[in-house]
Image: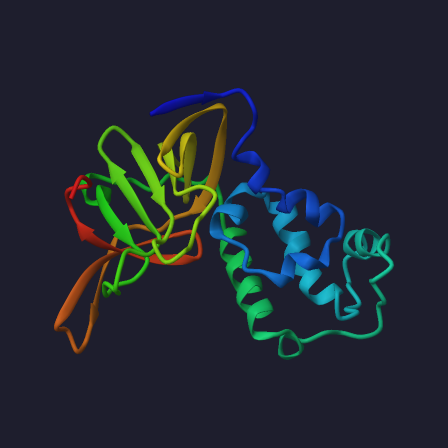
Amino acid sequence: MLITCFCKIAAQEFNESERVQNGDLTLFDNKISDLALAKMNNSELRLLRNMAYAKYGHIFNSEDLTKFYSQFDWYKPEKKVSDSELSEEELKLVNRITVFETRQETKASLKFGKEINGVWHISAVMPATWADRFVIEPENIMEFLVSNFEENPVVKEYLGHYEIRGNVIIFNVDRIVKKDATIKLEETLQFKFPVTAVSEVSFMDGKLTRQMLKIGSYEYYLYYNDPRS
């Protein structure tokens, strides 16, 4: 069933940029997805990354950061905050954001052939069921499927096309799947992930070899060359 939606049905899920501008510290209460980071520009990513330190009273050398955080009552600059003062989850987020800040659309573009086509899974070894995965097909068709471990996700699948600019794979989503309905979006959603070339990695003392593609801040492993498998 294909439904055309006039409202910005999926865009409502990605309000992290607005929350950053509002100095919303609850951003750190739940895990921020790579999709959310891919929706943000580098200026917003920088503000979010430094917000992890600002919440503990970090004194910034950059005047623009000091000016930005000073508009919020919670910011009390007192000291230089080190990574050791961040929680484990905050530090992981900082490191993931840093990966996204490596996006450079103006550099020479990565070249991919048929090796990019297939089902790319976030785990090298299959657990009880599928986790997050990208499905990349010929003609630049691309899908992102949300992990089966996630109960009742608002959106189960993101469908569209991709292009490569520099070290960035730009995922233009024009349809989403909610429950059992495929919804055509009135306005395309654009996600920008840093991407690497395909490489080969080995596990278990060389007994298991997988093709690996890093998309965003995670490594994805090739399970099937045939995207329809």
Quarter of the image where one finds residue 143: top left
In the shown orientation, is residue 82 left or right of residue 141? right
Residue 205's x, y, as percent? 17, 78
Residue 31's x, y, as percent? 54, 60
In the shown orientation, is residue 172 left or right of residue 197? right
Q: Nearer the viewer, residue 66 or 190?
A: 190
Give the quadrant of the N terminus. top left
In the shown orientation, is residue 75 left or right of residue 148? right
Please, which residue is most extreme toward the left here?
Answer: 207
Quarter of the image where one finds residue 211: bottom left
Colour scheme in use: rainbow
Give the quadrant of the C terminus. top left
In the shown orientation, is residue 180 left or right of residue 155? left
Residue at 50 percent across and 53 percent down: it is 33
Quarter of the image where one finds residue 26: bottom right
Residue 94's x, y, as percent? 58, 63
Q: Nearer the viewer, residue 117 or 186?
A: 186
Residue at 69 percent across and 47 percent down: it is 19
Residue 116's x, y, as percent? 24, 44
Q: Count how many numbered circles sit on residues in the image.
A: 0
Q: Nearer the viewer, residue 165 or 13?
A: 13
